[in-house]
Image: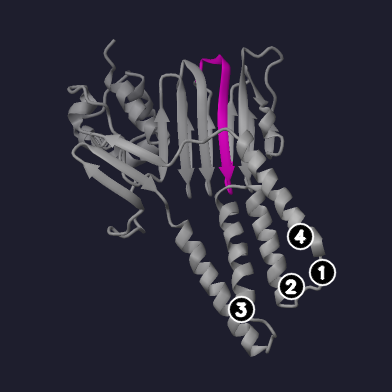
Amino acid sequence: MEQTLGKRIQLCRKSLGLTQDQLAEKLGVTAQAVSKWENDQSCPDIAMLPKLAEIFGTSTDALLGYQTEPVHEATIENKAKEENEPEGIHVQKGNWEFHYENGRRGGLFFALLVLAVGSLTMLSEALSWDVSFWSIMWPTALLVFGLQGLFSKFSFFSLGSTLFGGYFLLDNLNIITLDLGDMIWPAIVILWGLSLLADALRKPKKPKYKFIHNNNTNHAPVRDFDLEEDSFDIDVSFGEASYDIPLSMLRKGNIDCSFGEVVVDLSECEEVAKNCSIDADCSFGELCLRVPKKFLVRPAESTFCASVNVVGQPDSNPMGTIILDADVSFGEITIEYI
């Protein structure tokens, strides 16, 4: 069955993570008008179509259904970023592109390392501390390396690097006198083993490598939302976003939230598959998962150390169960039954 103009508007709006109120504000109309468009109770004025197409990052022909190419997401630009500043590796060959997103975290922590070493060295000279440059350099590097790992994702290895780097730095500066003796190295080995065990038990996440054909994605996404026939994939960093998941059958979901706030609403999901699961990775962020009371959310076994709050409760006889596999690092996940 051919898709209507209203359904195309709804699909484009949700692919950008916009609510009806937000789209209405951009267009200068009421939310009721947008609702009527999406429910095919009325059509937008013809003068409104170019503005709709501009917001959605498509053409008026595609919006009206006159071409078969898929509707592309509009590029979300970071105004504070300079045009010539690289975000990673980008190679293009004809219609094919390859991207590797490395971000700016490595440069940030290297800058912190240089500043910390320089400041501590200057302070040691000013206060006549009996400490060499190398005694400051290597524990500071270990400390910053551990913090960088914790910044991306919690691991026992990063935690150990942070703790022991801080311990050796304070010890070399004679700020603390606690002598752990021969216990240091067994403790390092134990933390390393715990980190390897946690990585082996943790489900692999989607890599940051992308192969793109016919430019069917944006170049530097701040928010990434993919909606499949029975699954969804959300990736939000350094921002706030809200997404509705309008699926007749939900089988799989993946949510990655880093330094942001994300609301994922499953109220439009009609039913869930037998082994339905949602992987949620929340680092220094907040995730709110809004679930109809007809579904039960059950934490997976690997979620034993994650911080998950529950608001409300499901029906006594739920229609289906969603397995939540959560990985929380200095963040918070809330399950809200509606």
In the picture, the disc for residue 274 is none
The majority secondary structure of the magenta stretch comes to strand
Instruction: Quote the CA–CA distance across marks 1 and 4.
Output: 12 Å
Q: Amino acid at mark 4?
A: Ile
Residue indicated by mark 2: 171
Name above or below for residue 258 compared with residue 140: above
Residue 144 picture location, percent across and down: 58, 63
Please tell me how crowded label 4 is: few (under 14), some (14-19), or many (20+) other residues with Cα within 10 Å.
few
User: Which residue has dot 3 on it?
Assistant: 120
Res 287 quadrant in image: top right
Q: Report whether 291 appears left or right of 307.
A: left
Which mark is nearer the camera, 1 or 4? 4
| Mark 1 neighbour class, 10 Å CA radius: few under 14, some 14 to 19, many 20 or more | few
Q: CA distance from mark 2 to mark 1?
A: 8 Å
Which numbered disc flags the more N-terminal residue, 2 or 3? 3
For disc 4, the marked residue is: 184
Q: Earlier in the sequence, mark 3 or mark 1?
A: 3
Report the amino acid beneath label 2. Answer: Asp
Q: Amino acid at mark 3?
A: Leu
